[in-house]
Image (spheres, rainbow, N blue to C red):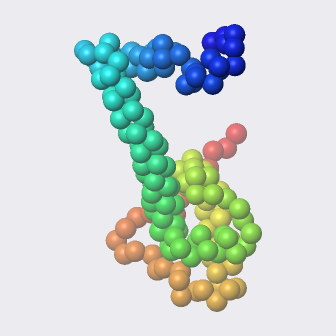
Amino acid sequence: MVFLTPLNLIRSRGPDKAWRKRMYLRMSWSYYGRKRHCFSIAVRSVRKAMMYSTKAKYEKKKAFQKMWRLRIGAACSEHNLDYYTFMRTLAESNIALNRKVLADLAIYEPRTFQSLTIFVKQRAEEMGLSDALKQPPKHVMTRAMLKLPTIST
């Protein structure tokens, strides 16, 4: 918008309404019916959709954090270790691995995760947390009980 006098600059109330309308209608291009073409309905739909997307963003983060905790907890219980002891011992040993990395290690690198659990068990005994180490469950076969075949090249 070009203003030829300062009086018009003072009177202006932001960008043209056409730009605002176009923005909302552009955001509602995938809707069906009047939500797509009628501006007053499109505004409500787009604002509601933005509210839902913001809420879903936080819900997604919570879901991933819960999934990582479950995966790490399951991998720890395979190696007869408590989740909280595992995480606390890692933190006190200055091993800065976040839950996402630990969950990926537990799934895709089980031997690396096993070495971490061995380290944590030794460190927990040094710190006097030996009572937190769990006994292996009876009648349950874990990956640690299986002898994995070695690949010779």
Where is residue 104? Give x, y as percent. 57, 50
Q: Residue at x 53, y 80 (%)?
A: 133
Does residue 65 sit above or below 38 in this rendering? below
Where is residue 25? Give x, y as percent. 41, 16
- Inspect this view and state whether residue 148 appears: no
Q: Image quadrant for the C terminus? A: top right
Does residue 75 sit above or below 29 in this rendering? below
Q: Nearer the viewer, residue 29 or 125?
A: 29
Total numbered labels placed on residues in the image: 0
Q: Image quadrant for the N terminus? A: top right
Q: Nearer the viewer, residue 89 or 43?
A: 43
- Residue 45 position by quadrant: top left
- Residue 127 position by quadrant: bottom right
Q: Residue at x 58, y 57 (%)?
A: 99
Q: In this view, does 130 lie to the left or right of 61?
A: right
Where is residue 132? Give x, y as percent. 53, 83
Furthest residue to the right? 94
Q: Which residue is drawn at 53% across and 73% down?
A: 84
Q: Is residue 152 left or right of residue 49?
A: right
- Inspect this view and state whether residue 10 appears: yes
Q: Residue at x 37, y 75 (%)?
A: 138
- Residue 116 position by quadrant: bottom right
Q: Is residue 37 left or right of residue 102?
A: left
Where is residue 65? Give x, y as percent. 49, 55
